[in-house]
Image (spheres, helix red, strand yellow):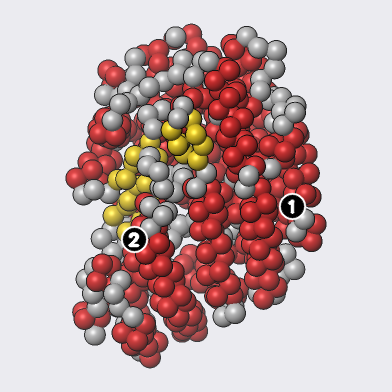
Amino acid sequence: MFNTLPKTAHEFMDWDWPQIEPYLNDLLNRELTAENVADWLVDWSILDRLFSETYARLSIATTLDTTDKAAVEKFHHFLQHVIEPASAANNNLKQKLLASGLNPVGFEIPLRNMRQEAEIFREENIPLATEERKLADEYNRIVGAQTVQWEGEEKTLTQLKPIFQNGNRPTREKAWRLINERRLQDREALNALWVKLLDLRVQMAKNAGFDNFRDLRWKQFMRFDYTPQDCKDFHAAIEEIVVPAATRIYERQRQMLGVDKLRPWDVDRDDVYPPSRPALTPFETVEELVSKAENIFRKVDPELGDYFGMMRRENLLDLDNRKGKAPGGYQSGLAMVKRPFIFMNAVGIHDDVNTLLHEGGHAFHLLEAVKLPYSQQWEYGSEIAEVASMSMELLGAPYLTAKEGGYYSDSDAAHARIHHLEHILLFWPFMAVVDAFQHWVYENADAARNPANCDAKWGELWSRFIPGVDWNDFDAARMTGWHRKLHIFQIPFYYVDYGLAQVGALQVWRNSLQDQVQAVKQYRYALSLGGTRTLPELYAAAGAKLAFDAGTMQELVDLIEGTIDELHAAI
Ligand SMILES: [Zn+2]
């Protein structure tokens, strides 16, 4: 009967639950044997891919235009009337497979994950999860509506980003103060949204039998291979090894600007990263951004270049910044057509180049893993997903020069690479703040219901991990920094993943300095395994080690600082 299912997500979008349910019942009622389990998994995968791509397309539509109420309604309708019942039915299918005692080939890790998922599944949490996603959209709506008047024009805060690349300090200060005032206008609204989210999460944890939302989240994220204590060890290693290196970067930046103290308007994204100096202008048009990115991917690996060329031809890129578009960048998988889609907000700065290399890495991961037969095998964790993307930023970096087909003169490319490597060093302490904050929040959920306590905790962590920038006179802005980190509102605990992934990506890059062809081969092999191996095994396949210790951090910090010195000599 599965050949009567729609062939595309576009058709499936118009299907209602009563049309879909018989297919799930068919799967549920089939008797499972060692002989038919592979066919059963193939049929289930077809349905799973239809749900997944429809979800992706409806979700993408809400981010392309956050003012499109019809798109939001359509998405919410689908969540409530299809995803909710489907999620319960899917769970029954997983139970059935687990109960059968069968072990299909290549399915060990998906089975391990299913066992865990079944363990934490609670019917009463399904509507709460839908509620949580709606509150997450509310966060996008609040932040997406933040605009300021700048030189007589209404501008999104993203559109003001290029000003922070500007050498003119008074202009930066003026823009920063304006942005800060605008953001603080939403302080109460975000505090109110926060309390709702926190209560909802605590309730979901309780429903699943946990005292602490973190314990639930750990299991939801399938973190089998590291513990909260490993994360705290990682924070300690960062404080010991990385914070001093980060402080050296801020000090160089201060000297370069010739100022007494580095102020918040001297740094840029997330209030952490000094902008590249000289200000880099890598491209004029999105077409230029895209065509040069393709050249770079091709230099890393000709087949990866072909992948990206296909994405261009098939319109799988939406890259320009427009008012009303949701903030940030992401890659989303379209499971039915087996294609990735990339979303971002390009305004003509170096960050955009990096974001595209990054999302390109995610896209390649999907294209490699999608070759596995069952959709459950494609489900890999965020850590290895970010190894895929962050490695691509580093592997692409040597080809940023115009003579390699990239964007820059040799000296601008050296500046861009120094900036990128500095960015990596400055990221880890920031990540430690975001992660340690969330450990505190969910270990102290009662206290965290009072946003003033969250402000105090964020402020304390900020002083500990990011001592290099002077926020004097701007306490309200400094302490509400957690309002500006969408992960805290939308994807709790999804952040240390980036820090651990960077540890993996830097090792892939380290290997490529010895032998690029071999390093990229290992990298692609790791991606092609999808979610069929444990995390340490996936790292090992990529030629890296999953680690949290000061020794590893020291090796990587030395490599970064050494390369920065070499690049300085080349300018
Ligand atoms: Zn990413």
Residue 451 is marked as 1
Q: Is label 1 or label 2 in front?
A: 1
Q: Residue at x 36, y 14 (%)?
A: 410
Which element is circle 1 on?
A: helix
Q: Residue at x 69, y 60 (%)?
A: 195
Q: Which residue is mark 2?
A: 57
Check the image and name the residue furthest to the front.
Answer: 152
483 left or right of 384 in image: right
Considering only vertical position in the picture, is 120 above or below 314?
below
User: In the rendered image, is residue 557 in sight?
Assistant: no
CA neighbours of label 1 inside 10 A, class few (<14), some (14 to 19), many (20+): some
Percent from the top left, x then y, of residue 565?
53, 14
Percent from the top left, x then y, of residue 351?
44, 31
The kind of residue on which mark 1 rests is Pro
The kind of residue on which mark 2 rests is Arg
Which element is circle 2 on?
A: helix
462 left or right of 431 in image: right
